[in-house]
Amino acid sequence: MKIKLAIVFNAVLSCACFAQGNAALDAFKEIVAKRQVAFEALHSYKTKCQFEVAISEDYAKLNGSAREGRKTLDFTAVGERMKMVEDIIDSRNDVIASSTYYLDPLSVTVVHGGSVRLATIFPLAKGPNYGIFDAPVFLEYSFLGVDIGEWGAPALRVSDLVQKEKWMSPMSSIKDVSFGQDGALSVSFQGPRGASSVEFAPRENKQFDVKKINFYHADGQLDRSIEVLGWVDDKALGRIANECKISVCCSNPGAPPSAVWHYKITDLQFNVRVKPAEIEFDSASVNTIVDDANNETIPVPK
């Protein structure tokens, strides 16, 4: 009798776990479907944000950067293209350096300000691990990429966000999905270059907000985590993250983050009628172009 009861109990428990797993998967599918529908009408956007960074001493030496700093970022995006102006701010709130980033379907172009204007063109698979990568706009949906390369989470373009296929693409990479005791929904993914996980915090009316995203290397070590700290409500698109923190981890498991980026969006506009030509890189605006893919320096005739 005890054996029969144990078999029945295990069967009931298995059914309960299976049902909970199905409920969690259905909840995730509903979240993605609602967000996909909300973004269908997005045409373009503009946004400004403040950016603070704190970097460990070793990481700063490796990258040749200051350990602390402040920046302002100005984004414009339409279709497959994006432009970002980055101003570095000193303690007196003066701009001490400026760079402009252009993202197109094939490359990232970085234009450095100064008396001699230099542009560097990187192939899309290889670029600076800041700026267009780990960009704060819609960073809460970076899990749509499932995994990331060594350069960080690529910015989500308007052309990505309006595609149903982009929103559905993580479904085939789901490794596990479950509810926690607090009602939080957790989903993990396995991709060809590594893994990721996303945690959704519950709120009223059975709604969920992205709380945290983790990206892992192929060997399972944590690469970086993205925490959402604040939200704004848009009539058309719903809740949009306007404050987030990115912690980039070093190679030693359990060690503190090598760098922490803190973004806060100060102005966000959607469906502004931006023309693609307004955010395309103009080679006439620089003196020299460095082609990183072909290791060539191209003088620009004036």
Image: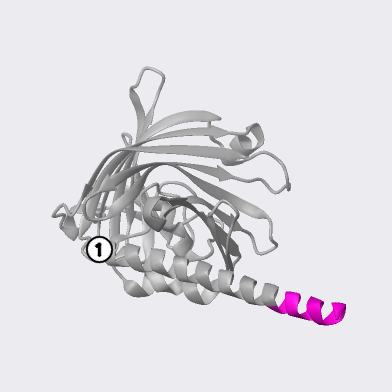
Quarter of the figure with residue 63: top right
Q: Is residue 86 above or below residue 27?
A: above
Residue 52 within the segment the image draws in magenta: no
Q: Which residue is mark 1?
A: 79
Q: Position of residue 127 (x, y in %)?
A: 47, 55
Pointer 1: residues within 10 angstroms few (<14), some, or many (20+)? many
Q: Amino acid under label 1?
A: Gly
Report if residue 86 is visible in the image: yes
Residue 3 within the segment the image draws in magenta: yes
Q: Position of residue 66 (x, y in %)?
A: 53, 30
Type of secondary structure dominating the magenta stretch: helix
Element at label 1: loop
Q: Residue at x 71, y 41 (%)?
A: 255
The residue sitting at the top extreme is 92
Q: Residue at x 31, y 34 (%)?
A: 115
Q: Is residue 237 left or right of residue 96?
A: left
The residue sitting at the front extreme is 1
Q: Position of residue 170 (x, y in %)?
A: 48, 71
Q: Is residue 257 left or right of residue 298?
A: right
In this view, the residue in front, 119 or 186, is: 186
Q: Is residue 46 above or below residue 147?
A: above
Q: Residue at x 49, y 34 (%)?
A: 53
In this view, the residue in front, 161 or 4, is: 4
Quarter of the image that includes the N terminus: bottom right
The residue sitting at the left extreme is 273
Q: Residue at x 36, y 75 (%)?
A: 165
The magenta span reads: 1-11
Report if residue 294 is visible in the image: no
Q: Position of residue 114 (x, y in %)?
A: 33, 35
